[in-house]
Structures are given as C-alpha cells and as structure tokens.
Image: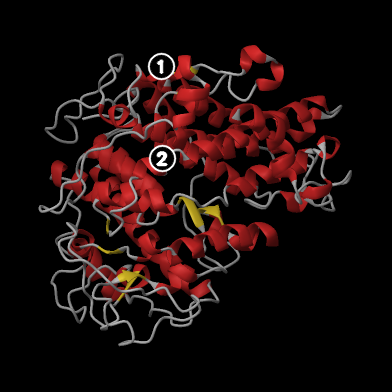
C-alpha cells in the first residue's frame, strides 16, 4: 500500500545525495548506498527542501486553475484535471513523513535545544505545504498520518477537519517564527540549509508573511483569531518582506521561494529541468496571454503595444510569431496552432518561422530560464497587497485608507521592480526589457484601471483583488484562492468556467483508506466531491466583498 511504502522509504529516498556526515560538512553517499543508518538531520532537512523542486503542477494549472481564474487562455481540452488532482497529495505525505522523522532525530540529540532553528525552519517549510494542501483538498489525514510504522492500527489514518488543521498550523507558525534565534549556540547545518541560507531574518519574514496571508484569507470565518494574528504582526512591527534589494545576492530575501542560486546543483537541475520540460509539453506550450488579462494591462487592442500601461507585460509575455501583441480570446473561440517553445529551448524561434503562432504567449526567456527563475511561494508584492486590504477594511487594525493606498501602490511597485530585477539578474535573458521610467510608472499607477481611491470602498477592494490576482500570475494556486475568496477578480464576459472550489481526493484513498474516505466524502465520486456542499460547514458573510451569497471560507470545501 502506498502509505506503508511511503512510511518505510520516504526518509531514505529523500535523503539520497543530500545527507551530511558527522560535522555536516560533506554530503553522504549517493542514494544507491544509502540506508537507514545514514538518515541524518541535515539529510532529512535538505530532503524537505528538495521536495519543493517537484514542479508537477503545470498540467493541473493549465487544465483547471488558469481557466477557473480567467488568467491564461488555454488549449488543453484533452486532459481532464481530475487526472492531475492527486499529484500534490502524493508529494505531500513523504514530506510530512520526513518532517516527523527529523523532529524525532532532533529530540534524540543530547543537545536538542541547539537544533531549535533547524526545527523551526522545517516547521515553516512544512506549514507552507500543509496550508496549500488544505486550500486544495479541505479535510485531510494529518495528526495520525504517516504513522504506519506504529502498527496496523495506523495504516488507515482518519481525516482531520480543515478548520482544525488551519488553526494548528497557524499556531505552529507563530511558535516557529517567534522562536528563531541568532544565538551563536545554535547548530548550523551549513550548506544543507539550501532554502534561505540560514538567514534568520529572511526566515522570520517568510513565517510572518504566511501567517498574514492566511489571517486575511480566513478573516471572515475566524475573525477574532485572524485579527489577533494581524495585530501581532503589524502592531508588533514584526519582520515582513519589504524594501527588497533588487541585486542578485539579496532579492530572494523578500521574495520567498526556491531560488536556483541558493540550491545544490542536483536540486537546481531537478527543479529547472522539470519546469523546462513542462513548457515544452504540448498542452502547456499552447498556453497564451488571455484577452481578460490583456484588458487589465493595455488600454487598447493596438497590436503594436501602444496601449500597454502595465510594465510587467513585457516580462510576462511576448509578441506572437507575427510580431503582434495579440491576446487569445479567453473563451477559446479562436484556436492556436503555433509551437513557440520548440527548437531546443535555447533561443526564441525567429519571427515568421512559426506563422501558426497567432497569439502572444508566455515570454520565451521566462519559460526557458533554467538558471535563475524562482519557484515563488510569497513575494513582497503579495504582502503589500495583503496590507492594503487590511487597512482598507480595518482588519485587526484601525481602518486607514491613506495607509491602504500607500501599501497598494507599494505592492504594484514591488511587483514591477521584482520582475525587472529578475530579468536583469538572470544570465539567461539575452534580450532584457528596458526598465520602466519614472513617467511610465506614474502612468501605470494613475491609469483609471489601476488608480486607487480608498473613499470608494467597493472600487478599492476590487482593485486590490485585481492587482493581487495579477501579481500571482505564476502562482496560479494563489490566484485561485483570491478568486474564490473575493469574487472580485476580472472575468471575461464570454467565458464562465465551472466553479471548482476544491480538488477531489485521489482514487487510491477510496481503495486503501476507504472507511475514512467514506466519512470525509459521503462516498461521493470525484466530480461530486468538487460540487457537493459541506453540511457541517460554518458560513461567513461575504458582504464586505460582494453581494454574492455567503461563502464557506474555512470548512471543506470552499463553496459559493
């Protein structure tokens, strides 16, 4: 059974090539020589980091998340998303197994307290993955999961309630983030800390940013809890991503994710090779800039680009092979036949050689960059836009529309600065877009589709949601969360995809963990799981956001 196999093998499997010897200075033997005696604290920790390189969400993004969010035009009509819905599930439980094994090894150390930073960094890494699991699936096996080694009674773990896990993980995040220390007595695992390079301030920013994101996300369901989190972070002036340094050496400290420059050679290859292969794959290579997004970035349909006011357009997308700025209709009414990412993914295909490529697609350099492109989790721009909403609504702090505007505009500037710094710092980008001038940034911030007016509450919230949605262009799972929560993001009037508020559980849960699966789903099929309403779900008014009916924010699933 898969869960038993995970329990027995995950620790050793993720260790392969990543563990350290007694002084944590040299790597262990390759996986073929690994055994349980070589499972180490650095090995298990770095195995957790390496698990972030599993990029296998692109098929799900193209077949489900981008269509739902109206964010990218797509052509993948032959691959139903249920074929990919279990991918993240399958990657999560080996990670959870390794985390718990890591804590067990730390507890066995005679100087266990000196490993508290390692414990807390691992806790923050796990939290980021667990929170996304909850967003995707709702109730999941958690408290008693990956315990098969305890005996047959643990082979089939029950599902914990989504709301309970959210609360538990948020509490763990606070403990971990507040507990991180610069005390010189802490044991360093050196190069095995390949995520944020032992930068304690960056780790504190990461933990606080995750707490803030979910305090905003769950606010209408758990207002007292979430207001306390917001007050703790903002009122306590705790570290958050801010004032990013756009030089190569430091930009990752305020834009958290898997950065190739910080990772081992083997891990870098695994991360970027998977990403490169995903864009070369047919369904993903057929992804195009949507008409819906184009309308938020250009004031006209002029194919020369004369109407473009959002500077990020030039980083995210490129002209068609006919050298035209041409969005594909979101509704798929005009099919695309081009293949812009063929030819070895080393240079863009010459203009005119792929005449079937009629529409603008994801920028070739961004799609093919194996050297510097990060897999982002949360950015400085994301955090500023969360704070804009917090001040505009008065969530855990006094309502202040002036501060809301300041944070909103800081979020837009941070997003533009980040993407242009990325192109500048990446050695792969052979043709770098010119940095926007001060006049261009002013034109961007004052464009009627962007300009902020906190006195018009409804319009302010709509613009915050729209810009948060745009800022997560390459974090489609986050865009999905924004769409579900707010109901305020732009939608093409000719394209209304089915509403999907959670992913179905993998089929093998029905087979291998049937009774608990039955209790969680009522025996529903994958399609029914997506559409059914949760009878035990407490509801939170969405009136502050829109006139839509109440929405289930915290219980499984997210439903309108």
Q: From the top left corner, tell me how far across and down residue 424 is, in percent.
A: 49, 75
Quarter that holds the N terminus: top right
Task: Specify the label residue 518 is tagged with.
Answer: 1
- Which secondary structure, mark 1? helix
- Quadrant hosting residue 536: top left
- Name the residue: 30% across, 46% down: 403
Element class at badge 2: loop
Neighbour class for label 2 at 10 Å: few (<14), some, many (≥20)?
many
Q: Is residue 387 visible?
A: no
Report the front residue among 122 and 265.
265
Note whether 300 is above or below 409 in the view shown.
below
**Mark 1: few, some, or many residues within 10 Å (few <14, many ≥20)?**
few
487 vs 74, nearest the viewer: 74
- Among numbered discs 1 and 2, the one appearing first in the sequence: 2
- Residue found at x 41% / y 21%: 163
Q: Where is residue 513 drawn, in percent x and y? A: 51, 20
User: Residue at image x 45%, y 49%?
Assistant: 57
Quarter-of-image position of residue 440: bottom left
Residue assigned mark 2 = 85
* 500 lies left or right of 418: left
Query: From the viewer's perspective, is residue 77 above or below residue 417?
Result: above
Residue 291 coordinates in the image, percent (x, y): 19, 63
Give the CA separation, mark 1 to mark 2.
18 Å
The quadrant in which residue 401 appears is top left
Q: Residue at x 60, y 46 (%)?
A: 51
Q: Is residue 104 left or right of residue 338?
A: right
């Amino acid at each position: 059974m898969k869960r038993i196999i995970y329990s027995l093998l995950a620790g050793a499997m993720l260790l392969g090539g990543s563990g350290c010897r007694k002084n944590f200075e040299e790597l262990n033997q390759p996986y073929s020589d690994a055994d349980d005696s070589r499972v180490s604290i650095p090995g298990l920790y770095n195995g957790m980091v390496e698990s972030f390189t599993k990029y296998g969400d692109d098929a799900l993004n193209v077949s489900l998340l981008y269509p739902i969010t109206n964010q990218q035009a797509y052509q993948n009509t032959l691959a139903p998303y249920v074929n990919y819905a279990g991918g993240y599930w399958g990657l999560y439980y080996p990670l959870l197994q390794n985390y718990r094994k890591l804590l067990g090894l730390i507890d066995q150390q005679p100087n266990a307290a000196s490993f508290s930073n390692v414990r807390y960094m691992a806790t923050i890494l796990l939290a980021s993955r667990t929170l996304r699991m909850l967003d995707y699936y709702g109730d999941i096996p958690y408290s008693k999961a990956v315990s098969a080694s305890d005996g047959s009674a643990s082979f089939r773990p029950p599902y914990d309630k989504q709301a309970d896990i959210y609360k538990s993980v948020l509490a763990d995040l606070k403990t971990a983030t507040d507990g991180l220390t610069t005390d010189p007595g802490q044991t360093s695992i050196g190069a095995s800390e390949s995520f944020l390079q032992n930068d304690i301030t960056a780790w504190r920013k990461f933990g606080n940013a995750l707490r803030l994101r979910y305090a905003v996300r769950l606010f209408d369901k758990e207002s007292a809890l979430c207001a306390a989190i917001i007050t703790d972070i903002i009122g306590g002036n705790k570290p958050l991503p801010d004032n990013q340094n756009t030089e190569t050496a430091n930009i990752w400290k305020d834009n958290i994710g898997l950065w190739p420059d910080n990772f081992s050679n083997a891990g870098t290859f695994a991360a970027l090779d998977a990403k490169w292969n995903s864009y070369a794959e047919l369904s993903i290579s057929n992804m195009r800039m949507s008409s819906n997004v184009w309308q938020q970035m250009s004031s006209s349909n002029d194919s020369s680009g004369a109407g473009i006011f959002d500077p990020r357009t030039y980083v995210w997308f490129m002209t068609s092979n006919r050298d035209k700025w041409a969005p594909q209709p979101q509704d798929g009414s005009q099919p695309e036949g081009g293949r812009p990412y063929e030819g070895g993914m080393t240079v863009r295909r010459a203009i005119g050689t792929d005449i079937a490529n009629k529409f603008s697609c994801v920028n070739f350099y961004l799609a093919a960059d194996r050297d510097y492109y990060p897999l982002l989790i949360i950015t400085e721009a994301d955090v500023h836009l969360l704070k804009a909403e917090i001040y505009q609504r008065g969530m855990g702090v006094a309502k202040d529309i002036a501060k809301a505007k300041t944070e909103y505009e800081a979020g837009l500037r941070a997003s533009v600065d980040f993407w242009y710094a990325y192109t500048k710092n990446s050695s792969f980008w052979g043709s770098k877009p010119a940095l926007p001038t001060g006049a261009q940034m002013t034109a961007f911030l004052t464009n009627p589709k962007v300009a902020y007016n906190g006195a018009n509450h409804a319009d302010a919230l709509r613009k915050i949601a729209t810009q948060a949605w745009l800022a997560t262009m390459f974090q489609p799972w986050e865009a999905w969360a924004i769409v579900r929560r707010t109901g305020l993001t732009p939608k093409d009037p000719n394209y209304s995809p089915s509403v999907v508020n959670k992913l179905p559980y993998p089929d093998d849960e029905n087979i291998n963990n049937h009774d608990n699966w039955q209790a969680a789903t009522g025996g529903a099929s994958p399609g029914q799981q997506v559409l059914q309403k949760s009878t035990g779900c407490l509801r939170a008014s969405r009136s502050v956001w829109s006139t839509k009916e109440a929405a289930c924010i915290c219980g499984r699933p997210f439903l309108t």
